[in-house]
């Protein structure tokens, strides 16, 4: 039935990939993303596309676009500490710091830097 078919399709995803997603990010690639985001403080879609071009130069086999890098960055920046565990991964802490810089650059608005 459809439940069995769905389970079979899910189990055939290649290792390191979730259904309908590209390859997983490894720690070195996340470090690169955060380094580029800290250098560029991306605000507009063009900024994220430029960041993606730089990322591609370092990780050509990943072929990530600006939208996917932006989604990954914001998923890190919006990660909450687990209940009972006040520590957060270094990448999450760095993403949160960069996110605060983006907010300051845009005066708390999204999409346009202050003049």
Image: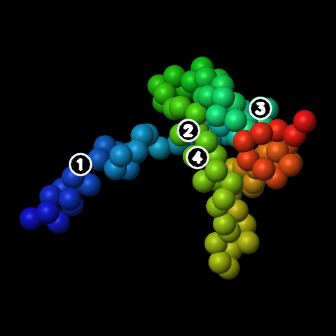
Q: CA distance from mark 1 to mark 2?
A: 26 Å
Please give the residue where the numbered disc 2 appears in the rendered image.
Answer: 67
Judge from the rendering whether residue 12 lies leftward or rightward of residue 41; answer left or right: left
- In the image as oriented, which residue stretches furthest toward the left? 1
**At which x and y percent is residue 111?**
72, 42
Which numbered disc flags the more N-terminal residue, 4 or 1?
1
Please give the residue where the numbered disc 4 appears in the rendered image.
Answer: 72
Choose mark 4 or mark 2, whichever is in front: 2
Image colouring = rainbow
Choose mark 3 or mark 1, whichever is in front: 3
Choose mark 1 or mark 2, whichever is in front: 2
**At which x and y percent is residue 36?**
72, 32
Please give the residue where the numbered disc 1 appears in the rendered image.
Answer: 12
Please tell me which residue is depicted at 69% across the width and 30% down the height of the picture. Answer: 47
Please tell me which residue is depicted at 70% across the width and 62% down the height of the picture. Answer: 88
Using the image, determine if residue 92 lies above or below residue 85.
Answer: above
Which numbered disc flags the more N-terminal residue, 4 or 3?
3
Please tell me which residue is depicted at 64% across the width and 72% down the height of the picture. Answer: 82
Q: Nearer the viewer, residue 22 or 110?
A: 110
Please give the residue where the numbered disc 3 appears in the rendered image.
Answer: 40
**At which x and y percent is residue 68?**
53, 40
Which numbered disc flags the more N-terminal residue, 4 or 2?
2
Q: Secondary structure at mark 4?
A: helix
Q: Nearer the viewer, residue 57 or 78?
A: 78
Q: Which mark is residue 25?
A: none
Which numbered disc flags the more N-terminal residue, 3 or 2?
3
Is there any visible trace of residue 87 in the rendered image? Answer: yes
- In the image as oriented, which residue stretches furthest toward the top? 57
Q: CA distance from mark 4 to mark 1?
A: 24 Å
Q: Quadrant of the N terminus?
A: bottom left
Q: Secondary structure at mark 3?
A: helix
């Amino acid at each position: 039935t459809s439940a069995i078919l769905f389970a079979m399709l899910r189990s055939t995803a290649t290792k390191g990939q979730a259904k309908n997603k590209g390859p997983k990010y490894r720690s070195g690639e996340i470090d690169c993303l955060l380094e580029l985001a800290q250098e560029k403080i991306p605000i507009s879609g063009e900024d994220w596309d430029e960041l993606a071009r730089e990322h591609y130069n370092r990780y050509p086999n990943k072929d990530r676009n600006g939208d996917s890098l932006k989604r990954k960055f914001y998923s890190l920046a919006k990660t909450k500490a687990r209940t009972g565990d006040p520590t957060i991964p270094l990448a999450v802490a760095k993403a949160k710091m960069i996110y605060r810089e983006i907010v300051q650059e845009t005066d708390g608005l999204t999409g346009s830097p202050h003049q």
